[in-house]
Amino acid sequence: MANKSEIGSGTFEGEVYYSSTMPKGKKDDWPFKYDRELEKTMGSARTADNDSLKAIQKTLISMKLLEPGQDDGYYGNRTKGAVKRYLLNTQPSMFDAIKESDFNIFK
């Protein structure tokens, strides 16, 4: 694992973490589509065990929301902020939300 001083540093804006590999951009620059399973996985990060959290961190690294070397299995501020960034920016479309709600007219 990389030494903490070797790991790139991003910035925080409130509780949201912006990695050096994917800094804050324009609103329309978000490259990820809504994925229900990934949203569930990210939502469970706070209570995940070390191995599961490392897998989530590796996913965040592959998405460039965390810097390489930050997969330590610790739910610290950077991981928390990267998860928050993902969850805030990747929302279901109105169609997906209706489809999954109790008011689903398509059932």
Image (cartoon, rainbow, N blue to C red):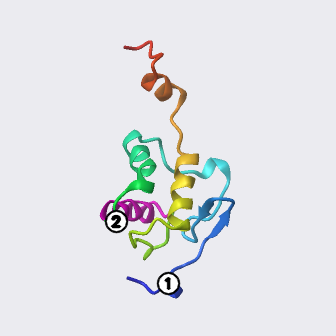
- 88 or 15: nearer the viewer: 15
> Is 44 positioned to the left or the right of 91 in the image?
left
Q: Residue at x 61, y 65 (%)?
A: 23
Magenta stretch in the rendered image: 51-64
Measuring from the top left, give residue 19's x and y in whole percent. Answer: 57, 68
Q: Which residue is mark 2?
A: 50
> Is 48 positioned to the left or the right of 10 in the image?
left
Q: Which residue is mark 1?
A: 4
Alpha carbon of mark 2 to alpha carbon of mark 1: how far? 19 Å
Does the magenta-highlighted stretch encompass residue 55?
A: yes
- SS for dot 2: helix
**Quadrant of the rendering where the C terminus is positioned:** top left
- SS for dot 1: helix
Label 1: few (<14), some (14–19) or many (≥20) C-alpha neighbours in 10 Å: few
Establish if 64 lies above or below 37. below
Does the magenta-highlighted stretch encompass residue 12?
A: no
**Quadrant of the rendering where the N terminus is positioned:** bottom left
Label 2: few (<14), some (14–19) or many (≥20) C-alpha neighbours in 10 Å: some
Dot 2 amino acid type: Asn
Q: Earlier in the sequence, mark 2 or mark 1?
A: 1
Q: Quadrant of residue 10?
A: bottom right
Q: Residue furthest left?
A: 51
Q: Residue at x 38, y 65 (%)?
A: 58
Report the disc number at residue 52. none
Magenta stretch: dominant SS? helix
Q: Residue at x 45, y 19 (%)?
A: 102
